[in-house]
Amino acid sequence: MNFALQNTAIDPIHQFQVTKWLDLRLGNIDISFTNASGFMLLGVVLCIAFFGYAASKKALVPGRTQSMAEIGYGFVADMVRSTAGEEGLRFFPFVFTLFFFVFFANMIGMVPYAFTTTSHLVVTGALALLVIGIVIGFGIWKNGLSFFKLFAPS
């Protein structure tokens, strides 16, 4: 029997390897389109498509898709409100986007042999540094340099 997948690896470890799909260079800088960037893009597209479809049918009695979108919206809004208060709701769009990007990326990773983008430290580290940078930047903007006094023991 001759199968199409005969020469490919059929083990779960190979799903974590980053492979180039499109080799691109900008001078000496490698900006190749990889399976990691492809699956991140797929997660963004699925997220936009899901919420776009859910918001397109604004029914008084919501269907399944609209209900799931509203439940997700309410969950993230309640989480932001309970941890940061009413003033923290200015960060709701950022937290909502980050939450559902990670959610859709992890759901894609549940598909067998799909690439899980959040399994790589560089992705989770970049998202964490983005959040920390925003928190510190907002803290300095709001409190000035006395923001750093919050970290000193009393």
Image (spheres, rainbow, N blue to C red):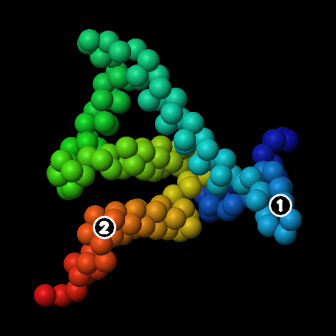
Q: Is residue 83 left or right of residue 132?
A: left
> Which residue type does callout 1 highlight?
Leu
In the figure, 18 relative to 49: above or below? below
In the image, taking residue 99 as reference, residue 123 lies left or right, namely right
Q: Residue at x 23, y 82 (%)?
A: 149
How packed is label 2: few (under 14 Cα within 10 Å), some, or many (20 or more)? Answer: some
* Kind of residue at badge 2: Gly
User: Please, what secondary structure does the residue beneath circle 1 have?
Assistant: strand
Picture coordinates of residue 32, whole percent (x, y): 77, 57
Residue that appears at 69% across and 61% down: 18
Residue at 64% of width from left, 54% of height from top?
36
Mark 2 against mark 1, which lies toward the viewer?
Answer: 2
Residue at 47 percent across and 22 percent down: it is 53
Q: Quadrant of residue 34?
A: bottom right
Q: Residue 126 at what x, y percent from top left? A: 52, 65
Secondary structure under tag 2 reads helix
Q: Residue under circle 2?
A: 139
- The total of numbered circles placed on residues is 2
Which residue was labeled with disc 1? 26
**Above or below 61: residue 38:** below
Question: Quick one: which residue is furthest to the top in this view?
Answer: 60
